[in-house]
């Protein structure tokens, strides 16, 4: 026997279908818009620096390179764009995407928009491991004739980020429930501990190591090169392609771990993979550009406000938004104190700290109501 749907139920179903279709159109338009904005900022950023190059000239050089017309790539502008500026812009896009994805994953894992690798000590843990690799690695290799390879830094930072993320999750989660207050306090404690140990390493370091440690603490893209990009890209790009596979699981975790388990999802596997991906992303980012804060909280939260909490759209848009934000911050870092260069971590903190305070006040007012 067939049961006919009531008119009210049909109206509700059609309304839900129309709402879902509208969300999909809104998400598609957002992806196209953010992608175009990111590309435009990338062209502008490639022309900024001690040698100013017009965006039209930058676009012409890039088109000539892509089309294989190498005979057109003769001159100072082409050399600056292809060998100095382009790897820096691409590195900024990769790191921005990785940090924003890490924030979105942590917020989905902890089911709270206040989670961020920089705020809860994960970046500090990765930075501590990178600092230990620089200082202790050089001391261990002293007298052997070998130098510390750059590839060792992402490995060390990844291990530090992984340990910090696991420790934070174990401290803040009890019986499948994560306490946001415990998470933030534990993050402050982990960050303070990592900061004190990093200070100890700075105390015993030599002048060259101290300059490197200062670079990690402030964040900078000044050392970007094709060699670093070749090392970091194989770590970050697979991460960006793997993260959308977690979208369905993160959507289910928004209902609670018990509910996600009853829906037939491998909850522990999803949590373990999310922690691993966060550690990879933060480790690679910190090893390459130092500690850059607030990208992981600003971008996912703004996107969540604009298009909703569906991770099928939130994750790819976070990657695009993070790339756009960091390229824009890099432009500001090169212009604010030109011809000198401001550390990019200062720019992101100047933008992200007021946003975080606004977010805290917004949540507090919501609770009071």
Image (tube, helix red, strand yellow):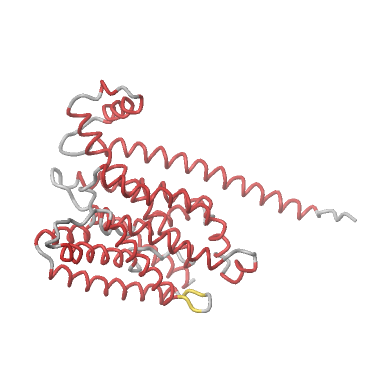
Q: Horizontally, is 68 left or right of 47 in the view? A: right
Q: Horizontally, is 148 left or right of 368 in the view? A: left
- Nearer to the camera, 199 or 276: 276
In the image, residue 24 above or below residue 146: above
In the image, residue 30 above or below residue 299: above
Which residue lies at the image location 17% right of the left edge and 69% below the top edge? 201
Q: Whole-percent x and y of residue 40?
A: 35, 36
Q: Horizontally, is 7 left or right of 165 in the view? A: right
Residue 346's quadrant in the figure? Answer: bottom left
Q: Whole-percent x and y of residue 137?
A: 20, 63
Q: Whole-percent x and y of residue 334?
A: 20, 45
Q: Whole-percent x and y of residue 321?
A: 40, 48
Which residue lies at the image location 26% right of the left edge and 67% below the top edge? 128
Residue situated furthest front in the rendering: 144
In the image, residue 64 above or below residue 121: above
Residue situated furthest right in the rendering: 1
């Amino acid at each position: 026997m067939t049961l006919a749907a009531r008119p009210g139920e049909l109206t509700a179903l059609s309304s839900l279908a129309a709402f879902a279709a509208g969300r999909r159109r809104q998400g598609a338009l957002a992806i196209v818009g953010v992608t175009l904005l990111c590309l435009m900022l990338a062209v502008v950023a490639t022309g900024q620096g001690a040698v100013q190059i017009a965006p039209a000239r930058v676009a012409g050089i890039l088109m000539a390179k892509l089309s294989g017309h190498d005979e057109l790539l003769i001159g100072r502008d082409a050399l600056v764009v292809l060998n100095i500026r382009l790897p820096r812009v691409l590195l900024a896009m990769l790191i921005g995407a990785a940090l924003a994805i890490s924030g979105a994953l942590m917020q989905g894992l902890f089911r709270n928009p206040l989670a961020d690798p920089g705020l809860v000590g994960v970046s500090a843990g990765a930075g501590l491991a990178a600092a230990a690799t620089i200082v202790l690695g050089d001391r261990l290799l002293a007298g052997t004739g070998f130098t510390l390879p750059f590839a060792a830094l992402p490995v060390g930072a990844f291990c530090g980020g992984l340990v910090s993320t696991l420790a934070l999750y174990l401290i803040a989660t009890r019986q499948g429930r994560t306490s946001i207050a415990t998470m933030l306090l534990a993050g402050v404690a982990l960050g303070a501990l990592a900061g004190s140990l990093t200070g100890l390493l700075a105390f015993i370091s030599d002048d060259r190591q101290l300059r490197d440690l200062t670079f990690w603490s402030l964040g900078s893209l000044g050392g970007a090169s094709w060699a670093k990009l070749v090392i970091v890209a194989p770590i970050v790009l697979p991460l960006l392609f793997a993260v959308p596979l977690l979208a369905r699981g993160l959507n289910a975790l928004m209902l609670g771990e018990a509910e996600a388990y009853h829906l037939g999802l491998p909850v522990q596997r999803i949590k373990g993979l999310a922690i691993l991906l966060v550690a990879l992303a933060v480790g690679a980012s910190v090893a390459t550009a130092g500690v850059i804060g607030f990208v992981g909280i600003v971008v996912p939260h703004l996107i969540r406000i604009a298009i909703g909490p569906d991770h099928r759209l939130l994750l790819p848009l976070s990657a695009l938004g993070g790339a756009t934000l960091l390229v824009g911050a890099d432009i500001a870092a090169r212009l604010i104190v030109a011809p000198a260069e401001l550390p990019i971590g200062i720019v992101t903190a100047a933008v992200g700290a007021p946003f975080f305070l606004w977010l805290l006040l917004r949540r507090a007012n919501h609770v009071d109501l």
